[in-house]
Amino acid sequence: MPKQGWNSQIMASFFKKEASYNAGVVMDSTSACTLTGFTNGPAEWDDKVVNDREEISGREFGYDQKIVEQRVKIPLSFPKAKPNDLIGLFALALGSITSTQDGTAVAYKHSIVPMAASGDLPSIQVEERWGDTQQYAYTGVKCNTLKVSAEEGGFVAVEAELLGSGSRSSSATAFPPSVSESWLLVNKMNVWLESGANISIDAALTQGAENISSGSPRDISARLKSFELNWNNNLNERPGFAGQGVLHALDHKRRICELKFTMLFEDTTDLDNYINQQPYAVEFDLKGSIIDGAGTLYYGVQIIVPRFKLKKAPMPQGGADEFLTVDFECEVFEDGTNPVLIVEGYNAISGYLQ
């Protein structure tokens, strides 16, 4: 009988990183979780396959073919993301995470920022089984790209492209439990925008309150139509010599952070800011239900971009029967003080990539 897609599983060692690149992780409930709510297909084996059609072999159509280098690409797509999805993938993409417990409550704040440019991104192990068939384990898995997006009236979505060393082996490891959490709803997200000299990023973030201004920033929650944040590590695949058909390393090149969003048009404030090339800061703050009644933290996420400028004039657009909207296309910069991207996630998991 044909296998059915609903009966597929993926697990990732979000809670434990590899001790060294491609070393693998012991997959159990302390190191890994089973992922749910994804829509992507199986991993792509984008191997380097070579044949002898270009050489003289005495045969019109050639004779032989070999896999010279193995490659593994793992797409992950969660249209209705949960805190664990977002925290695990942000930690893998940015590389630096610090977890703090909320007193004695079973609740934790996970502060995530980009690691130093000279650092080595963490790697994990991922396993998959599709349609209750053969199970495969992939090691040396790093995050190449990450996209977080949302539209009004919907959910926070997250997509990632993970790259492995090319190592793949059969596995019979039992899948650990999934993390039980609620979806991240946009109707619980506040968004603030600040520009110019009033930009000031708080050293300690407060859930449900703005953390980017020394004055009174604009609350654009009711005007926002959608946003999209992209992070690209530009991973460089290094097969080198003596790699036995898998990668020696996945090193990041110059990283890229991109932001764009759309909101209802009200006035020319942002056009003036574009003309004068004023810097901006933005904060997305989603505060859900309390994690543990004995504590003070709530399920959610805070995302702050401390400095960007508009790289295209924000001109209003829309038809006769529509409200005018304006698109922000943003160039993200460093501000000399804060990380280029600041993320704090909140849930009941004690730690990631330990």
Image (cartoon, rainbow, N blue to C red):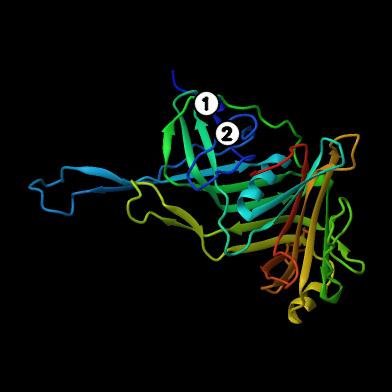
Q: Secondary structure at mark 1?
A: loop
- Residue drawn at point x = 55 percent, y = 66 percent: 254
- Residue drawn at point x = 44 percent, y = 22 percent: 2
Return the mark for residue 329.
Answer: none
Q: Position of residue 171 (x, y in %)?
A: 46, 28
Residue at the far left in the pictured view: 58
Visible in this render: residue 51? yes
Visible in this render: residue 323? no
- Nearer to me, 316 or 221: 221
Label 1 with label 2: CB-CB less than 8 Å: no
Q: Is residue 182 above or below residue 21?
A: above
Mark 1 and mark 2: Cα distance apart in space: 10 Å
Q: Secondary structure at mark 2?
A: strand
Return the mark for residue 173.
Answer: 1
Amino acid at dot 2: Met
Quarter of the image with the N terminus is: top left
Q: Position of residue 295 (x, y in %)?
A: 89, 39
Q: Position of residue 213 (x, y in %)?
A: 87, 67
Is 118 situated left or right of 101 in this image?
A: left
Is 179 situated left or right of 26 in this image?
A: right
